[in-house]
Image: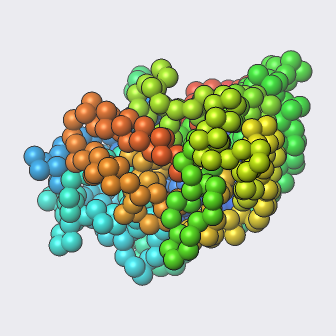
């Protein structure tokens, strides 16, 4: 790989070129043409993949690092650092054959400052680091109660890595696509010590260049990135990425309209109606000035109902299954999506699992259609009437979803259920949900990996809270769930998933409201910018004309 080594002079010229190109970016200058700019209003706390716990961190980490496998735009698991893999006969060992043309980014920690070749020992180190209690990574759950207790990770040689499980879990291949599982170099971790969060080094399409926290983060193109397009041209096409940190969404949108940003993630509620029609289309005055991208997002928004509380009796009426079913039928989800969401998302009138993960877009044979008459009949079956009305129910949510809560309150009132709304800070809501101290709450479940099991794990009784916020427990569900974990036949596993989704839908510990969509506003000169079902920011093939 003699082409991998460049002279110090050329490195200096390249860096100098990028400094002037990236730091001097403005929308009307030619030198910014190949720099992709976006704003991260929530900020970035770390560029260490072991702390890729939220979207803002994940997006940046995804540009700098790679995982063994990754998720494509159709939610399929495809090769990345591993060119192929196979599972042992007992379904407890995953063998990964690694590519031999992967190099870490240049860094002073390496000999002569040149990035060395990645090997299987790096995978072992990265995974052991993830579960090291001293690191305290929020991603340690990836391997918790899943890996062999004696020797879970082993490099059989430079290009062959084996992952050993404590019991069969075929879904592990999808779990490994999580950014937490990015591969990192030991030398750089030790060289940087505590500063790896702000001076990262990976194998990804973009190289860390500069981060002035609170102002901007700059990445430059990796000239030695291993991926090529269909014509043999090296990826990425862009020369760099610039991330700004404006915490005001209105200011962000204004600067996007001025051409300073190439895309905006999501639409702030304050100007949603100005941009979109109720049908979810761009209004005529915006056509040609920007592009609207919408696609399925593996996120289910729902209402959760606590099923069990340690040492305390839960209050009626939510303990009554007929009342839970009545609430299901009382909510017009299509009207909700149309008027509150401007047609962003799909009505969740089937199960908890987004239909795309069950390989079906056709209606399932389970779920709840809007039918207030059926809702009223279920209320009667629960033993309530005009003389004995349903006791008031309290719903806890955050201010962002106050309008949603008001809408649901109005829907339930039509069938004879009174809803009180308690608005609390998000941090308090999450704490109380985790502690099982809220009986009725608004929640969302975003996939960590593209498998229906990730959604169904929310209802496995042996799981803590999170993910089992409702403390749902059903022995039949647990039995089928454990069978699905060991099933290596895809068709049979999907059938089990549907049975599980149907069972939990009938028990109704949650009331799904909608399956979400990724929504982006994009400048007209940005091409090949495709939404991702996990809402990853994928820039390897993006072109800026």
Left or right: 405, with 172 as reference point: right
* Residue at the image point whose x is 69% and y is 69% from the top: 428
> Which residue is most to the bottom?
134
Residue 241 in picture, x, y percent from top left: 63, 47
Q: Quadrant of the C terminus?
A: top right
Residue 94 in picture, x, y percent from top left: 20, 51
Left or right: 452, with 154 as reference point: right
Q: To which quarter of the image does residue 84 belong? A: top left
Pick the front one: 14 or 348 = 348
**Residue 434 visible somewhere in the drawing:** yes
Pick the front one: 487 or 54 = 487
* Residue at the image point whose x is 65% and y is 42% from the top: 379
* Residue at the image point whose x is 32% and y is 70% from the top: 128
> Which residue is most to the left?
89
Residue 403 in picture, x, y percent from top left: 82, 46
Left or right: 41, with 228 as reference point: right
* Residue at the image point whose x is 61% and y is 70% from the top: 437
């Amino acid at each position: 790989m003699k082409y991998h080594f460049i002279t110090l002079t050329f490195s200096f010229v390249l860096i100098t070129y990028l400094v002037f190109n990236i730091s001097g970016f403005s929308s009307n200058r030619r030198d910014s043409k190949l720099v992709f700019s976006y704003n991260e209003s929530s900020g970035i706390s770390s560029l260490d993949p072991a702390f890729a716990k939220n979207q803002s961190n994940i997006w940046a980490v995804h540009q700098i690092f790679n995982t063994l496998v990754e998720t494509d735009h159709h939610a399929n698991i495809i090769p990345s650092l591993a060119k192929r893999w196979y599972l042992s006969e007992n379904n407890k060992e995953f063998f990964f054959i690694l590519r031999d043309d992967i190099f870490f980014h240049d860094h002073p920690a390496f000999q002569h400052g040149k990035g060395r070749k990645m090997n299987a020992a790096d995978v072992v180190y990265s995974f052991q680091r993830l579960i090291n209690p001293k690191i305290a990574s929020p991603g340690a759950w990836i391997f918790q109660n899943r890996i062999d207790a004696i020797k879970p990770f082993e490099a059989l040689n430079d290009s062959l890595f084996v992952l050993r499980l404590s019991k069969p879990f075929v879904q592990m291949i999808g779990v490994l696509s999580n950014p937490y599982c990015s591969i990192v170099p030991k030398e750089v971790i030790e060289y940087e010590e505590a500063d790896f969060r702000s001076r990262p080094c990976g194998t990804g399409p973009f190289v860390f260049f500069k981060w002035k926290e609170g102002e901007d983060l700059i990445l430059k193109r990796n000239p030695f990135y291993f991926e090529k397009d269909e014509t043999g041209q090296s990826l990425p096409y862009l020369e760099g990425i610039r991330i700004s940190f404006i915490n005001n969404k209105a200011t962000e949108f204004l600067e996007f309209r001025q051409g300073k940003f190439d895309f905006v993630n999501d639409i702030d509620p304050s100007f949603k109606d100005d941009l979109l029609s109720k049908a979810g289309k761009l209004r005529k005055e915006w056509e040609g000035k920007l592009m609207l991208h919408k696609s399925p997002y593996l996120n289910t928004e729902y209402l959760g109902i606590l099923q069990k509380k340690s040492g305390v009796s839960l209050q009626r009426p939510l303990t009554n299954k007929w009342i839970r079913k009545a609430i299901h039928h009382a909510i017009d989800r299509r009207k909700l999506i149309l008027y509150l969401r401007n047609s962003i998302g799909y009505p969740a009138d089937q199960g908890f699992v987004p239909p795309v993960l069950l390989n079906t877009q056709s209606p399932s044979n389970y779920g709840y259609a809007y039918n207030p008459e059926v809702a009223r009949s279920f209320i009667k079956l629960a033993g309530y009437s005009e003389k004995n009305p349903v006791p008031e129910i309290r719903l806890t949510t955050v201010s962002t979803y106050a309008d949603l809560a008001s809408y649901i309150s109005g829907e339930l009132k039509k069938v004879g259920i009174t809803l009180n709304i308690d608005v609390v800070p998000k941090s308090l809501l999450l704490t109380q949900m985790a502690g099982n101290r809220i009986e009725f709450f608004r929640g969302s479940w975003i996939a960590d990996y593209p498998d229906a099991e990730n959604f169904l794990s929310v209802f496995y009784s042996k799981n803590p809270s999170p993910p089992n916020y409702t403390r749902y427990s059903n022995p039949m569900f647990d039995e089928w769930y454990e069978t699905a974990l060991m099933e290596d036949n895809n068709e049979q596993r999907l059938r089990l998933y549907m049975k599980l989704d149907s069972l939990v839908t009938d028990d109704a510990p949650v009331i799904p409201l909608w399956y979400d969509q990724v929504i982006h506003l994009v400048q007209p000169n940005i091409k090949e910018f495709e939404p991702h079902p996990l809402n990853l920011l994928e820039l390897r093939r993006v072109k800026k004309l």
